[in-house]
Image: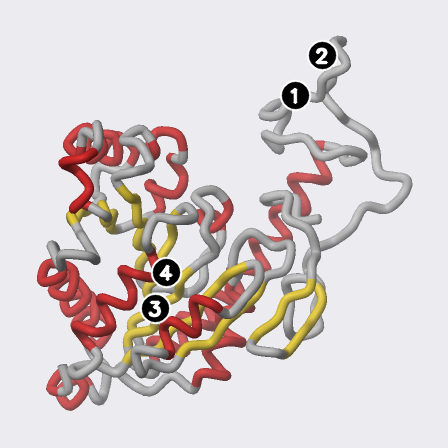
Amino acid sequence: MCTVCGCDDGEVKVEGKAGGGHDRRGHDYHHHLDEHDEHDHHSHGDGVHHYGHGPAGAHAPGMSQARMVRLEKDILSKNDEYAEENRRQFAARGVLALNLVSSPGSGKTTLLCRTIEALKDRLSIAVVEGDQQTSNDADRIRATGVPAIQVNTGKGCHLDAHMVGHAADHLDVTEGSVLFIENVGNLVCPAAFDLGEAHKVVILSVTEGEDKPLKYPDMFHAADLMILNKTDLLPHLDFDAQACIANARKVNPRIKVLMFSARTGEGIADWTAWIGAARAMALAGHPLAASLQGAA
């Protein structure tokens, strides 16, 4: 079990290739308890194990707080090594990598399909799709004519940097591309895992409630951009968009916000302009910057 988020060591598959745990290169950094580990359950005399107490800020049966802290540091440290390698490779090839994160049902894939249709004639695009099971989303992306590879995380609740690096190798992402990484639907665990992306983009639909940024602050704090999606439904909902934006900025004063509707196309120009500006930054100083920028 991963002590960072609690997800289990299930079978990870990258387009038909399988491997145990989160690591596809044979190095298992999801350590397991030994049978002599100190028990430190933080029971408060009521028979209930309380979360949020102790230096680890969590509780795992049979595991001491000290060991949880140590394992979390080990896991995230190893992930960060892979993330830095991904970032170096993306930078060397002038690739803009965007990590799209949200809860399930926010409309990530529909938004992504709409984005691809708007950009595919001007930019080279590739997509890494993350889900626990099925290749449904990768199939939808490939139907747009853009290459996509599906990563099934099994019992895992997030993509990690190693999965993304492995998937990108199989995609053979071309120089100057935009690589969209559609993470597993989850507003908790993906916040902790750097994938080597240039930006995290959090997508929040207007059907979810304007207090989501306050309930899941780590994700909104980690994101550079919030897309408020499904705005075509606003006339039918009691959703206060300005309150939602204010809540996001309480958590992250620097976060940028775009309003978007994949159904009507509202916000597509602002979103593609944001991508263009981010891509220009990714290409800054690249030896092929002039020719690659010209392709846009």
Of helix, strand and loop, which one carries label 2?
A: loop
Q: CA distance from mark 2 to mark 4?
A: 40 Å
Question: Where does the image place residue 248, in percent across and percent down from the top left?
Answer: 26, 35
**First in sequence: mark 2 vs mark 1:** 2
Residue lying at 19% horizontally and 57% vertically, measured from the top left: 263
Instruction: Say few, some or many: other residues with alpha carbon within 10 Å of mark 3 (under 14 / 14 to 19 / 20 or more).
Output: many
**First in sequence: mark 1 vs mark 3:** 1
Q: CA distance from mark 1 to mark 4?
A: 33 Å
Give the residue number, with chain letter if any, for mark 3: 180
Label 2–label 1 contact, CB within 8 A: yes
Tell whether 232 sits left or right of 147: left
Give the residue number, with chain letter if any, for mark 2: 44
Tell whether 160 sits left or right of 26: left
Vertical placement of 60 versus 2: above or below?
Answer: above
The residue type indicated by label 2 comes to His
Residue lying at 22% horizontally and 37% vertically, measured from the top left: 253
Residue 99's label in the rendered image is: 4
Residue 135's label in the rendered image is: none
Residue 50's label in the rendered image is: 1
Query: Exactly how many numbered labels are in the figure?
Result: 4
